[in-house]
Amino acid sequence: MDPIQLAQTKTRYKEERKKRLRSDGNAQFIQRRKGQAPETLQIRSKFVTIAAGVLNWPKLPKIPGILDYQGDMFHFALLAYDVTGGSPKEPSLTRLRNKHILIVGTGATAMQIVPQLAKWCKQLYVVQRTPAMVDAPAVNLVDDGWTRATALIGLTGYAEGPKSPEEIPAYTARLVEIDAPRLKRNHARVDQEVKDPAIAEKLKPWYPVGCKRPLFHDDYLRAVDQDNVTLIDTNGKGADVVIFATGVLAPPAGTPAEKANMSVIGLNGVSMSEEWPRFGPTTLHGVIDAKFPNLFLSGPQQASISGNYRFSLDEYAKHISYIRVEAKRRANGAPLAVVPSAEAAEDWGMQVMMHSAPMGVANGCTPGYYNLEGDLDRVPGEYQKVLARSGIWGWRIEHWLEIMESWRAKGDMKGIVVR
């Protein structure tokens, strides 16, 4: 990214931050029209849902002097076809021929592009911090691989998991034991795919599956073993192009407002970006906050999550739709405000905190977006309760769904105030 592009990006971020969502039904945002000065628009809406996603803000590593680099540089989420050649319709990376390419990162993004880069460039350097766990992507609708990855409950939660922080070490050790056969199979696959023993050892993960996202690819391991590909650490290498495959901001990090890159103002002028980090969310079921009427949220804080995020979104949508429809029915055409009672929100926050222990296995894992890039291990003790209150339902999504379905079946909208 050249200095001009960097300046344009910073300007765009500043404009995006001017977006404002208020609890009185007003929304303000900046619309930039080509060749014209920005305009401020106001929109009124009865209900608003923040559906900004969880993997939406590409991040760059904190490398001193990164802007001093004179070659081409970009994050792969913003693929620079003027550098690589090709297009979305014709993905031929012709401009990389005879070039030395350095790619930083070996996660899900790099898994997909390293084999392609290796086909086109003269020399590819793959900068790895932590080896990925790469399995074969065999398609089997019954024996799908996820089902047998039992230790994933360290990520999604488990009703029979620890009930207190003191039980977490034994629970973590049990997950490592459960995952050991899978890890052994993964190491055997690395030895089979990679001819160079030294490279093979560097590509073997040492952590359980619940620590990092499990990956599946036929060609990645073989690509890293090619003659024109070098797996490196932090030793300097000359490169014409630097590609960052360093992922996105951690999904648990930031408020829904920050994920949407806007400010959300609630009752009495409360800012979501200031309130949540200090005290944690005050939601009912993770979908509506007591301090932000008529504003619905799409998780995962104080809600739940599964290995298939689309499934989670579908369940959030069902619950939100029920609350909206029932609230409008009760209002009988009158203007309405929908909000959890303070007591219901406090009770739900306590329940989330009491069910949070199974999620504690992320502490001690290699840095990644599951544990806020390792920051969970460094959180001060007084802030642990806020984090536990801000987490996801620790007894897995099936248990959370049972609670949601039971609540809807009663039909009394307990905890929701319609006025």
Image (cartoon, rainbow, N blue to C red):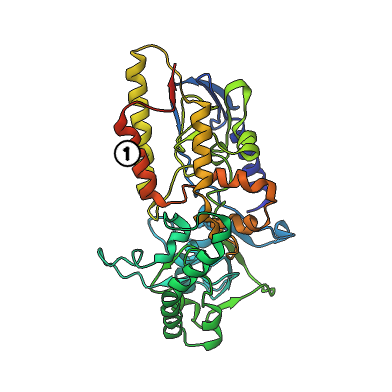
Classify 10 Å Cα crowding around label 1: few (below 14), some (14-19), many (20 and above). Answer: few
Residue 40 rendering spot, x and y as whole percentages: 57, 23
Residue 298 location in percent, x, y? Answer: 44, 39
Q: Which residue is mark 1?
A: 405
The one nearer the camera, 397 or 104, is 397
Q: Left or right: where does residue 338 sit relative to residue 346?
A: left
Residue 209 x/y as whole percent: 47, 67
Q: Nearer the viewer, residue 45 or 307?
A: 307
In this orientation, which residue lies closer to the viewer: 47 or 44? Answer: 47
Residue at disc 1, secondary structure = helix
Name the quarter where the N terminus is drawn.
Answer: bottom right
Residue type highlighted by circle 1: Glu
Q: Residue at 50%, 58% (x, y): give it.
A: 162
Total marks shown come to 1
Q: Residue sitting at 59 percent across and 33 percent down?
A: 272
Furthest residue in direction top, as rendered: 334
Q: Left or right of 270: which side holds 336?
A: left
Residue at 58% across / 22% down in the picture?
267
Q: Is 175 placed left or right of 89 in the picture?
A: right
| Whether residue 163 is situated above or below residue 321 in the rendered picture | below
The quadrant where residue 259 appears: top right
- Image coordinates for residue 95, horizontal then vertical, percent: 51, 65
- Asked if residue 245 can be seen in this view, the reply is no
Residue at 57 percent across and 77 percent down: it is 231
- Regarding residue 48, the answer to whether it shows in the image is yes
Nearer to us in this view, 213 or 95 = 213
Quarter in which the C terminus is drawn: top left
